[in-house]
Amino acid sequence: RSSILTTSMRMLLEAGADMNFVSWQGYSPWFLAVDSREMAKIHLLEEFHADQTIQNHLGHNALHLVAMRGDVRLFHYLIHHAPKSAILAANRWGNTLLHLAASSRHPLLTRICLTHTEIPLDTRNQRGETAFLKALKDGDLSSARLIMNAGANIHIPDHNGLFPLNAAFRFQNTGEENVNLIQNMLLAGAAPDTCDPWGETPLFLAVKRHWDEALELILNYQVDVHHAADPESNNRKTCRITPIMLAVRDGQTKIAERLLNAHADPNSIFNGKTLLYHAVKQQCPGMVELLIASGVKVEVVSEENPKEITPVQLAIENEDIPVVRGILNQAELSLLDDKIRKMIDHIANTELRDLLIEIADRKA
């Protein structure tokens, strides 16, 4: 059937049919032949010198179509036979062939573009994205590495102010290969402490995504561990959240330890409560132990608001014996607060009641 159609096409072309007729959607015979992936039709239209530069209503030409589909073999053929104007054309959003290849998740297409075309590496589309930045946003690590190694400028942000390094922290998978790419970007001079449009730094993003390896890497550079994210970014109108607050909130003890070793403040207040309170509320003894070891202020009763429940009172209510023991053993008090003493008689848990009596007697 294919050979019959090709024969019919030849007869029409020899009879003078318009080989460059464009439909209302911008599709030409050349575009449709490439879309069919039938090499006989493609060779026939090449023989009659069909216009390969025609773009459809979205600004895509046939090469763009093949790049988006990830058809490596056909793409390689067309690259070597297409006119330069078709290779350098951009679609209606300003994406070049390199942009499309870089976001196709087919690194061979990117390699072909870099090897066999003269597409400028740092051309920006209508959003201000270079092909390198677009590859990072779309999670195509291999293409991003190829473009970077080809000499792309890794410091160009998009029109919203998103830099490639921030995009790598925000969009890339949390794998070892991605850490290597980030390390190469930092070694190439990428700014390690730049805020993205959401007010989040690479360090903050590493904590937000629980990406311990990336956090360890970024802490080797001059970064602000106290930087609070823009409250508008997460619809928090009244609270600014720092990396250590985020780590404690999410129960990420290892990440919190790295931040505290980098001099994050263990006495930060988050949503009106201490970090120790949040750790106790989550019943996370490892985090409680870490905060106490970091010099957190241990309050048995709130000095500012005596009616407010404190971490140790919360731990007692939760009958969290390891946490109660950890906090009270560190509390520098001559005796337990009267409020807690009064709680002892009402505690049904014998082990907890005995612990409180023991500590109370010891501190008395």
Image (cartoon, rainbow, N blue to C red):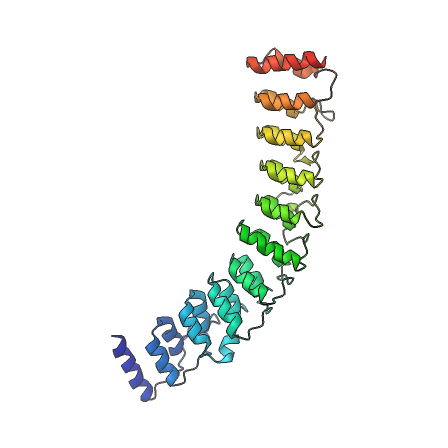
Left or right of 264 in this view: 86: left
From the viewer's side, name the closer residue of 111 and 133. 111
What residue is drawn where x is 51% and y is 79%? 85
In the rendered image, residue 252, in percent from the top left (x then y), is placed at 59, 37
Residue 316 seen in the current view:
yes
Left or right of 291 in this view: 71: left
**Relative height, residue 291 to residue 153 (above, below):** above
Question: What is the tally of numbered marks visible in this picture?
Answer: 0
Q: Quadrant of residue 51?
A: bottom left
**Relative height, residue 87 to residue 150 (above, below):** below
What residue is drawn where x is 55% and y is 61%? 144
Residue 162 seen in the current view:
no
In the rendered image, residue 55, in percent from the top left (x then y), is placed at 46, 75
What residue is drawn where x is 69% and y is 50%? 221
**Relative height, residue 87 to residue 191 (above, below):** below
Task: For the C terminus, give its image quadrant.
Answer: top right
